[in-house]
Amino acid sequence: MERLRAAREMLETLTPLKRDCGRLCGARCCASLEGEETGMLLFPGEEDFYEESGEWRILPAGRELLLICPGSCRREDRPLACRMFPLLPVPENGEIRVRTDERSRAVCPLARNGKRGMDPAFAEAVKRAGELLAEEEAQRAFLERLAEEQAELKALRIRLGAE
């Protein structure tokens, strides 16, 4: 739990840009489509940060938990996946690499340019947070599942010619 707390703190104030990136797109990553509830996957144990909150709902999503958000919140209340968005730390060849989250491509204009267009300090914090989390077995397994999902999504995107 301490590594999870530390990873969240690493990304509490850093954002993809040195300014509010939500102003570029109208905070599309925080908005659900009409009739649809969206949320972010919680890292193992992260649900403990939201148990007492009436604003947030936690739903099962396969082997994971999905946090349904109220649509806007204070940055310090955001789950780790939101704090990292649109990047994701993924285990590759025994180390953590930072990749653009394939799921972000549909909503985030920054995802088109990858981490090159983002604040390097933000990308580095995502990497450090991933390295810290990967030291715990449950967190590493979660990151590995996310990496597998990312590979499947990328292959699908390429197969559909959306590259």
Image: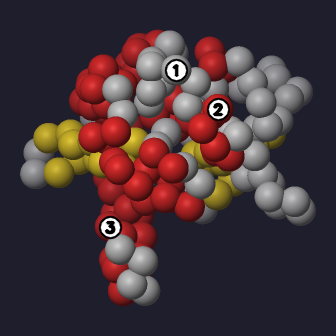
SS under mark 3: helix
- Can you see residue 8? no
Question: Label 2 is placed on what type of residue?
Answer: Arg
Give the distance between the C-alpha atoms of the residues marked 3 and 2, in whole angstroms: 30 Å
Give the numbered dot on residue 151.
3
**Is residue 72 rendered to the left or right of residue 126?**
right
Q: Nearer the viewer, residue 39 or 59?
A: 39
**Type of the residue with mark 1:** Arg
Callout 2: few (<14), some (14-19), or many (20+) C-alpha neighbours within 10 Å? few
Q: Quadrant of residue 50?
A: top right
Q: Mark 3 and 1 residues: CB-CB less than 8 Å, in contact?
A: no
Say left or right for 82 vs 60. Answer: left
The residue type indicated by label 3 comes to Ala
- Pointer 1: residues within 10 angstroms few (<14), some, or many (20+)? few
Q: Which label number is shown at residue 19? A: 1
Nearest the camera: 121 or 11?
121
Residues at circles 2 and 1 in contact by the CB criterion of under 8 Å = yes
Mark 3–mark 1 Cα distance, whole angstroms, equals 30 Å
- Residue at 35% across, 74% down: 163
Q: Earlier in the sequence, mark 3 or mark 2?
A: 2
Label 3, residues with CA under 10 Å away: few <14, some 14-19, many ≥20: few
Does residue 64 appear left or right of residue 110 in this picture? right
Q: Position of residue 24 (x, y in %)?
A: 60, 38
43 relative to 64, above or below: above
Q: Quadrant of residue 150?
A: bottom left
Q: Which mark is residue 23?
A: 2
Distance between the alpha carbons at the discs numbered 2 and 1: 9 Å
